[in-house]
Amino acid sequence: MKLYKKFIFMLLLSSGLVTTSCVGDLDVTPIDPNLNTVDKALTSQADFEAFLAQCYTGFATSGSYGPNGDSNISGLDGGQSQYFRGLFHLNEYTTDECVVGWNDQTIQDLHGLAWTSSDTFVAALYYRIFYQIAMCNEFIRQANASSIDFAEKATYIAEARALRALSYYHAIDMFGNVPFADETSSVGSANPQRIARGDLFNWLETELKDLVSDGSALKAARQNVYGRIDKGATRMILAKLYLNAEVYTGTAKYNECAQVCKEIQRDGYSLHPKYAELFMADNDKCTDEIMFAIEQDGTYTQSFGVTNFLVFASCGGKMDPASMGISSGWGGIRTTPEFYDSFATGDNRAMFFTTEQQKEIDDISNFQHGYAFMKFTNIRSDGQPASNQGFVDTDFGVFRYADALLMLAECAKRGATEVTATEGAAALSLVRQRAGLSPVTNYTLDDVLRERGCELYMEGWRRSDLIRFGKFTTDSYLWSWKGGVKDGKGVDSHLNLFPIPDKDLNSNSNLVQNEGYK
C-alpha cells in the first residue's frame, strides 16, 4: 500500500516557522488554520506520523487540498511551483534534453539560458526548497522537545533529517551560497545567516555520514516502508555530494564517491530486468532498483507536477493519449535532435514518438518540432489500466541503483583508487546490457556522460552532469537553441548557478547575490 494513503493532512507550521523558512518575504499559508500552534497539535504518535507524512507529501503535491488548491506557497501557480516539477524546469529545460512549447511567463528563458534574478520559475523552486527545509526543521525541533515517547521516534527524526539533507543538496547544487537554518536556529528570525557553498558542503557531509553510520536510527537500506527514506537513499545523497565536490568546493572527492557507491552495491540492490517498467503506473513494485520514490496516486495523491506533469506534458501532436494511459495531452515537452542522436541503434531506452514529428526544432512553440518523450506513462506493466486517466499512478524514482553504477564507472575513469578500471567497466556494462547494448572493456569520460544521459533522461540530473563535465555553459557542446539561437552558442559561466531571487535578497541583508547577476 502506498504511504500517502495512510496519513491525514494537518497543520505543519506556526507563524514562527514561516520566518525560519529562509525566505522572510514569503507568505506561506498554514495548512490548517483551525489549529493554532504545532505544539498543541502534536499530542500523540499519530500526530507525529501525520506531521512526518507532510514532510514527504511536500515533495509530492503543491498543497493539502487537491492538485492546485490552497498551495503551501502563495502567489505561485500550484502546478508550476510543485517541488519536482520545479526541479525538472531548472535541470532539464536548461539542457539538451528538453524544450517546452509553452510561453508561460519566463519559461522560454530557461532553455535559452537567459534567466535573471527576477525569474518566476527560479524563485518557485527556491521557495519550495526552503519551505521543505523549514518543515523538516520544525518537525525535528518539536520531536526533540516533546515529552511524548514512542519506539519509532528516533527513526522519524532521522527521516526528517535525511529529507532536509535532500533539499539542502538541491540548494547547494543549484543556488550555491544560500540562507541556512537548522533545528537549533532561533524561531522567529526573519534574516537567517548566509552559508557559503563550501561550508554547506561540510555540514551536509557531516550530517549524511552520521545518518548512514551504524549507530543511526535511520532504517537500513531496503528495510523501511516503500516511499520512506532509508540509509540506501541517504547514501545516494552523499554519493551525489561527493561526485560534484570539485564543482562545489574546488576539491575532487571521487575516491569518497566510489567508496559510498560500493557500500550501495553491498546494500543488495539490483537492476530491474525491464527498463520501461521503472516508469509505469505500477513501478512501486520495482523496489529492486528504485531506492527512494516520490509517490503519485491517481485518486489519493493528485498533483499537476511530478510524474503527472511528465506524462501529460509529453503527449501532443498525433500521439494517442490513451496509449499513455491518460485522458488528454498538454502538448509541451520534446527533446532536441542532438540529444536524440546520442542514443545508439538498438538502445531500448530510446522511448520517443516520431510519427509526424520533425526532428529539427525550427519553432520551439510547435509541439511537432522535436521528437516527443514516451518514457513515463500511466500504463501498468500487466496491461491493466491505472486507477485514473486524469491523474497518474506512476511514482517518481528519485534515486535508482543504475545511477550508483554509473557514478562508480565515472569515478574509476576519473582516477579514483577505491575502484579499479575493471570494476568501472563492469558497472557501466551492466547498465548497457540491460539497454540491449554490448558490454565495454574500455571507455571514455564522454562515454560515461552519454550513458548517463541515455539512462537518466527526464530524471533531473542532466544540468548537474553537464556542469561537472564542463559542457553546460561552454561552447564545447552545443544543442539547438542553447543560448537562444537555433544552432546553439556558449554563454557566460555565471549561469552554472541560479541566482538568489530578488525578493529574498532585498528582504535579508545577510544574503549576497551569486556572481554575475545584477
Image (cartoon, helix red, strand yellow):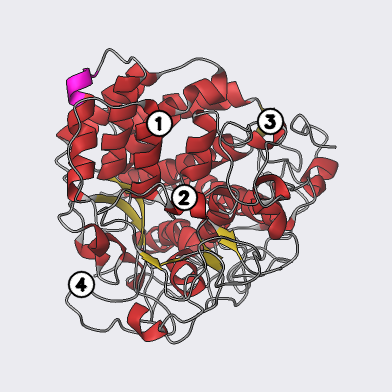
* Distance Cα–Cα, label 3 vs label 2: 22 Å
- Circle 4 — which element? loop
| Image disc number at residue 446 | 1
Q: Are marks 4 and 1 in contact (CB under 8 Å)?
A: no
Residue type beneath disc 4 = Ser
Q: Earlier in the sequence, mark 2 or mark 4?
A: 2
x and y percentages locating residue 368 in the rendered image: 55, 72
* Distance Cα–Cα, label 4 vs label 3: 43 Å
Q: Are marks 4 and 3 in contact (CB under 8 Å)?
A: no
51 left or right of 190 in image: left
The label nearer to you, 2 versus 4, is 2
- Circle 1 — which element? helix
* Distance Cα–Cα, label 1 vs label 3: 21 Å
Q: Earlier in the sequence, mark 1 or mark 2?
A: 2
| Image disc number at residue 339 | 2
| Image disc number at residue 381 | 4
- Circle 3 — which element? helix
**Magenta part of the chain:** 419-423
Q: Residue at x 59, y 41 (%)?
A: 478
